[in-house]
Image (spheres, coloured by chain):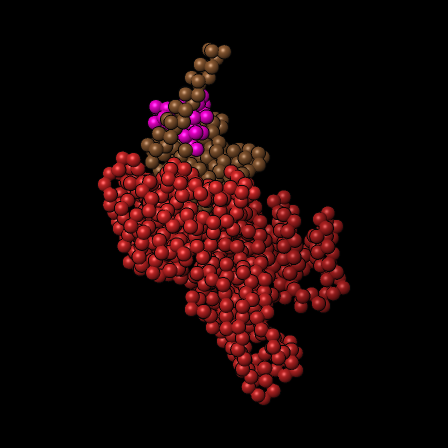
Chain colours: A brown, B red
Amino acid sequence: MMRFLLLFSRQGRLRLQKWFTAMSERERKKIIREMTTMVLARPARTCNFLQWKDLKIVYKRYASLYFCLGVDDGENELLALEVIHRYVELLDKYFGNVCELDIIFNFEKAYFILDEFLMGGEIQETSKQIVNRAIESSDMLQEDDHSEWYEVELFG
Amino acid sequence: MGSSEMCRDLAGEVEKLLKTSNSYLRKKAALCAVHVIRKVPELMEMFLPATKNLLSEKNHGVLHTSVVLLTEMCERSPDMLAHFRKLVPQLVRILKNLIMSGYSPEHDVSGISDPFLQVRILRLLRILGKNDDDSSEAMNDILAQVATNTETSKNVGNAILYETVLTIMDIKSESGLRVLAINILGRFLLNNDKNIRYVALTSLLKTVQTDHNAVQRHRSTIVDCLKDLDVSIKRRAMELSFALVNGNNIRGMMKELLYFLDSCDPEFKADCASGVFLAAEKYAPSKRWHIDTIMRVLTTAGSYVRDDSVPNLIQLITNSVEMHAYTVQRLYKALLDDISQQPLVQVASWCIGEYGDLLVSGQCEEEEPIQVTEDEVLDVLEGLLVSNLSTPVTRGYSLTAIMKLSTRFSSVNRIKKVVSIYGSSIDVELQQRAVEYNALFKKYDHMRPALLERMPIMEKTASNGPTEIVQTNGIPSMTAYNKNGLKIDFTFERANPNPNIAVITIHATNSTEAEMTDFVFQAAVPKTFQLQLLSPSSNVVPALNQGTVTQVIRVLNPQKQQLRMRIKLTYTHKGSAVQDLAEVNNFPPQSWQ
């Protein structure tokens, strides 16, 4: 299973963090610190896998963002790269040509998309369309909510 | 994210939701069930009825999560595993449909249909087929199909191939399929993509024990990977290279590995040096080659060599009697060049102390003897004592070496002077030694030659075994048999790179007043193991625990099963023949895990 997913910029600023197991705040901070130092220190054309304690770390750089996935030792690393790529595709489809700013300003949407794609450290849905549809319908629910609220305001 | 109490409370609800008609909810329920099982494994039974129809799902999302659920259940419980074996044909069918079906836009990734689901099914097949002939046979075809038909131009295809290879290697596949798998890995090794090379090296490392010959075919590619720029690849290539060393390729491989040792990063040097020592010890074609190799390691990576290698090397040198002159000469020359690498200096000073007489006598068969005077040798050793580069341990070695030379050299007065100077040294250890040696000169001069004579050949005991990359010692010994005064103890070693071989040494002692003659120890192991019995130290077990008969047993345990053994003992005691059979079941888990 996957243990965590971290997104951070080239300067080491954390943009997204998703933890699939319960961990104390201190442990999380420690992992974030170590991941950012380890991954950012890697030279350009080395392979995307690292061994860290008893986990495999799979990372990929997309433009200015590093996607770092920590998986169990028994997991397929090449498939983990595909998981990262699929998540990027989902973000891209939703935001349209996604960039780091999109994730910074709409991080809650990024988390929603992640929650529709992965759950409990495993892949939840393998079809891109279904994930997109789920996000769109939850977006529409949000829109509807807002309009009702506005009507109530008008009529006191 | 629920705690175990929450899981217990809500498990029933989750189970109900698994059967709901809404596929969106079903897939989430399945993953919830996975989490519940991870937190509270006892609740697994609760989900069993709901799993009946899981694989007949059409919806890929639900199908995927269902496979995850089944995998989790099979991994945790052997009963579940046996129960779900009957699903193998269904899984094979689903996988087949995925491969054969045409383009499906919903699940397509670069031309491959739902690779995530394919990989998960392959993983479940791996778990179900392991150790089971029938299931393995049922999957042979589909595995061959996936292995040959998957498109390898993109990472996706390679991910599926990788999982397929892992599955083939783990189940009881036929040999043709295994060769196919290793060849796929060989192809991966030549791929330009670093990730794929890394993954290939990792998998080959796992399979090198079982399919050694097939992996040997790719040895040259693996050795080339030692020169790769990527650190992770270099490390894997190094581990794999050590696993592949055998009597035939030792010279060639060692050349490459020593070259690697020269040029690699410091973080590798310690492991590489230990690996070289181990390999050299096992497969050295000649004593001279062995000594040369050790010298090479000491001079290039001398400061990274592990501390316990020094006593091992000393023991090795002592035991190669005919090479003493050559060894001490080479070590002396190395000392003249460089005294900063402590392990090298320690071994060298010890050797000069032992064999200094050979050094100055100018006898050397293997190479051109150098002309060296006693004073020059003493200069070098005294230099070590005063140098800032020497650690206290090294200073101790050189002081002792100087002392030993007092019986081998004629310039005893000079040595006496040096020793008395250090009698007031600040370093307590050094001071103590010097004072004791002084006393040796003054009061016990008649004992000096006897005390300082040549060391005898040392027997290697289990506790002095060399450490290596794989963790070895710490396995407790056990008493296997204790009856009628005959006691047999087993001690364990894992001192070789194959973790599936347990090296057991039996120690037989006899507490009765009569000795046991014609002592024969025989052993039998269950079918999944292989046994090799080496010759015993003797056939007579002396009376009253005055001696021990030892014998080495090597057990190959590729399936890492619980070690069991039947032993048969025959001996003659007080004129009558005695025979006994016993079962040994109390092996400590560390000896076979």
Identify the residue at image location x=48%, y=40%: A3
Q: Magenta residues, as a range?
A: A91-115
- Judged by its main secondary structure, the magenta piece is helix
Whether B121 is among the magenta residues is: no
Identify the residue at image location x=39%, y=60%: B131
Residue B139 lies in quadrant: bottom left
Residue B515 lies in quadrant: bottom right
Q: Tell me: B253 left or right of B307.
A: left
Q: Position of residue B546 (x, y in %)?
A: 64, 76
Q: Position of residue B508 (x, y in %)?
A: 58, 74
- Work out whether residue B377 can be spotted: no
Q: Is residue B15 above or below residue B398?
A: above
Q: Position of residue B97 (x, y in %)?
A: 27, 46
Which residue lies most toward the front here? A155
B187 or A138: nearer the viewer: A138
Identify the residue at image location x=58%, y=35%: A26
B154 or B39: nearer the viewer: B39
Q: Position of residue A118 (x, y in %)?
A: 42, 36
